[in-house]
């Protein structure tokens, strides 16, 4: 059993995965917004690429096989709508959000080394797990795709703000914690009786998590929200008795648009949960945001938020009933500001067809089995599950990285 797992290469887990859509380090945040709103992905990769044409007269290689440019092409991070929202909430950007949108995407990248790591497709599964346990959130794996010179020219002609990163005939894909957990779930029988043990027995319930009081201003925990995005978990919203009410999840915020920055700036954590919940914000909260923006003298943000709200009021019903093809026709020519919709933003597919997240927290019990928690997290596309007692008091959190550590130790024992 251990031999078959040890023999697995990373490439085995990358079969069928789509190529990464990339952004350049010089891309502005305005362009990032447009790219996110016209992409089916919540995250886009950011690349630093320095290509130079081959001019050596002695070069006798085959351009169709080797590629006709040389240089380093490296993924340096990833960005989502949450990065943009948190950036707009900073004090220096509240007075002039339009100026903030002109800055390059590099300002959104966290200064945490090792979050994105390049690996070769021949690397072992254990190597991938070790990198994740050391702090890597995404592994960048080359896809063995070859392009002819004619197809390469066509590809460059079609380049947009986001395009697949091609370097010497290769594209790249993400390998995430979720991918590895899914793999182990498919081979769960090999680890018996481990999967049936409770998370309490395995000791993987972490008490190192972020919380915010239900009535506290959401802006007071902006750093926590940003940190939870980097750690791929969430911020628990609790009451004075430690009862879990809900969460402020980056995965929910990633389905919102940049106007949510105004809500974070003005609302309490409890109100923000209702604002970003599936279905769009209640009208009374939208009016409350406008009133508080005006009271704080944030006229520019108020104007942009009002424009966004007006667009939603006049066209939200139409946008939900229109076909996806009409969305695509208008998407390429519509300005970024016109694409805004409070609470949620439009993508190339219809709103109802996309998977969106509620502010309701996904929970389990300390006696829940390991395999049950894995299935629960995978079903909701999360990297974590909150752990509560019968009275809904918060006990802790189970993260994928802790689950991977258990499987890593189990493989060593089997070997």
Image (cartoon, grey):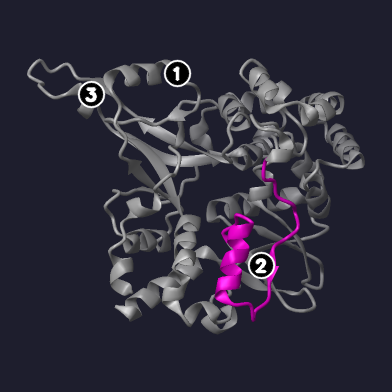
Q: In the rendered image, which residue does mark 3 sit on? A: 64
Q: Position of residue 237 (x, y in %)?
A: 75, 61
Q: Position of residue 391 (x, y in %)?
A: 80, 78
Callout in the foreground (3, 1): 3
Q: Is residue 97 left or right of residue 301?
A: left
Q: In the rendered image, which residue does mark 2 sit on? A: 386
Q: Is residue 184 left or right of residue 217?
A: left
206 drawn magenta: no
Which quadrant is home to the N terminus? bottom left
Q: Position of residue 254 (x, y in %)?
A: 64, 43
Picture residue at 86% right of the left edge, 37% below the top: 286
Q: Position of residue 377 (x, y in %)?
A: 60, 62
How many angstroms separate mark 1 from mark 2 (CA)?
44 Å
264 or 311, nearer to the observer: 311
Magenta span covers which residues?
354-383
Label 2 CA crowd tier, 10 Å (few <14, some 14–19, many 20+) = many
Callout in the foreground (2, 3): 3
Looking at the image, is mark 1 or mark 2 earlier in the sequence?
1
Which quadrant is home to the C terminus? bottom left
How many angstroms separate mark 2 from mark 3 (CA)?
51 Å
């Amino acid at each position: 059993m251990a031999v078959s797992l040890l023999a697995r290469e990373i490439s085995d887990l990358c079969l069928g995965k789509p190529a990464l859509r990339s952004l350049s380090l010089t891309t502005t945040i305005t362009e990032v917004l447009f790219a996110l709103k016209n992409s089916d992905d919540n995250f886009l990769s950011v690349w630093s690429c320095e290509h130079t044409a081959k001019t050596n007269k002695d070069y006798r290689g085959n351009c169709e096989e080797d590629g006709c440019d040389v240089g380093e092409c490296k993924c340096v991070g990833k960005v989502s709508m949450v990065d943009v929202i948190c950036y707009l909430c900073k004090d220096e950007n509240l007075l002039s959000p339009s100026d903030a949108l002109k800055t390059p995407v590099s300002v959104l990248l966290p200064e945490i080394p090792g979050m994105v790591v390049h690996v070769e497709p021949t690397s072992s599964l254990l190597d991938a797990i070790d990198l994740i346990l050391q702090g890597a959130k995404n592994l960048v794996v080359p896809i063995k795709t070859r392009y002819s010179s004619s197809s390469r020219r066509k590809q460059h002609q079609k380049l947009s703000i986001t395009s697949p990163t091609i370097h010497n005939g290769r594209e790249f894909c993400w390998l995430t914690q979720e991918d590895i957990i899914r793999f182990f779930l498919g081979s769960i029988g090999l680890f018996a009786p481990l999967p049936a043990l409770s998370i309490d027995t395995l000791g993987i319930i972490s008490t190192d998590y972020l919380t915010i009081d239900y009535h506290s201003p959401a802006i007071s925990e902006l750093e926590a929200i940003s940190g939870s995005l980097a750690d791929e978990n969430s911020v628990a919203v609790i009451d004075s008795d430690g009862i879990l009410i809900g969460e402020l999840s980056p995965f929910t915020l990633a389905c919102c648009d940049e106007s949510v920055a105004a809500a974070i700036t003005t609302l309490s954590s409890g109100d923000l949960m209702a604002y970003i919940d599936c279905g769009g914000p209640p009208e009374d909260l939208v009016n409350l945001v406008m009133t508080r923006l005006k009271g704080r003298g944030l006229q520019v943000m108020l104007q942009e938020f009002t424009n966004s709200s007006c667009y939603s009021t006049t066209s939200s019903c139409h946008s939900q009933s229109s076909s996806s093809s009409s969305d695509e026709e208008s998407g390429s020519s519509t300005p970024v500001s016109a694409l805004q919709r409070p609470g949620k933003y439009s993508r190339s597919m219809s709103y109802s067809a996309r998977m969106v997240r509620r502010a309701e927290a996904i929970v389990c019990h300390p006696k829940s089995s390991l395999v049950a928690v894995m299935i629960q997290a995978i079903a909701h596309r999360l990297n974590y599950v909150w752990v509560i007692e019968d009275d809904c008091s918060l006990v802790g959190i189970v993260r994928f990285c802790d689950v991977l550590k258990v499987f890593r130790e189990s493989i060593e024992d089997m070997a």
